[in-house]
Image (cartoon, rainbow, N blue to C red):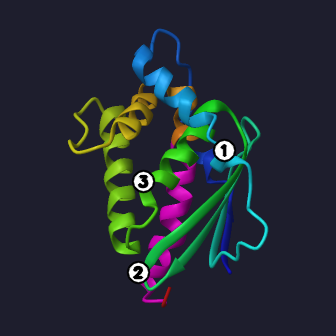
Amino acid sequence: VRSIDSGKASRRQSGCSRGVVMEPVYQEILIHYSRESCLDGRKPGFLPSHHCSPTNPLCGDQVDLYFLVKEESIWNCECSAQACAITRASAAILRETLLQKGVEESCSVMREFLTSFDAIIEGEKAFAGQSEAMKALLNVAGLPARRACARMCWDDTLGLLGGDLASGKEL
């Protein structure tokens, strides 16, 4: 099992979110995803090939993401999340986004999401083509104190799967 355990979230931007309000439709989407049963942990008998453990020491969020990668595709992803609603929603949206995609396509989607997230922080427009769930999560970029919650799973998963892809390691 290829694993990483990262505390990168402590280096991510944080700050005050006073004065910024998330649109109600996006709040509803994130609440829905935060309650997904896919966040309840690894099922017995599931043998992942890859694992990462994004954490945010500033707020205590802990997530475990387990991936089964075969034939350069993500066949399955299971999650365990002891975290706030935004982090839980982010993990569930990531899982839904990557399942049944090739690793290369998955890395491209994650890079596009993270680039859009950073563009919003800089006051620029995000890329088109995001799912409604991803758009809801991108809305969190306007909440400085919650940015790490929204992106930590994406950063660490890209580091895990993209690192293997870049190194030429067979998945």
Residue 37 marker: 1
Work out whether mark 3 precedes mark 1 in sequence or the reverse, and give the earlier one: 1
Front residue (pair 113, 11):
113
Residue under the image location 55 percent in, 36 percent down: 33
Work out whether mark 3 precedes mark 2 in sequence or the reverse, and give the earlier one: 3
Q: Amino acid at mark 3?
A: Thr
Which corner quadrant of the image does residue 41 belong to? bottom right
Residue 81 left/right relative to 167: right
Residue under the image location 58 percent in, 74 percent down: 68
Asked if 59 appears above or below 107 in the picture, the reply is above
Does the magenta-highlighted stretch encompass residue 136?
Answer: no
Q: Amino acid at mark 2?
A: Ala
Residue under the image location 42 percent in, 54 percent down: 97
Judged by depth in the image, the label closer to the viewer, 2 or 1, is 1
Residue 97 marker: 3
Asked if 76 appears above or below 167 in the picture, the reply is above
Judged by depth in the image, the label closer to the viewer, 3 or 2, is 3
Residue extent of the magenta highlight: 151-169
Residue under the image location 57 percent in, 48 percent down: 91
Judged by depth in the image, the label closer to the viewer, 3 or 1, is 1
Disc 3 + disc 2, Cβ < 8 Å: no
| Crowdedness near tag 1: few (<14), some (14–19) or many (≥20) residues, C-alpha within 10 Å | few
Work out whether mark 2 precedes mark 1 in sequence or the reverse, and give the earlier one: 1
Q: Secondary structure at mark 2?
A: helix
Mark-to-mark CA distance, 3 and 2: 21 Å
Disc 3 + disc 1, Cβ < 8 Å: no
Residue 166 marker: 2
Coordinates of residue 88 in the picture (x, y in percent) = 62, 40
Mark-to-mark CA distance, 3 and 1: 16 Å
Does the magenta-highlighted stretch encompass residue 160?
Answer: yes
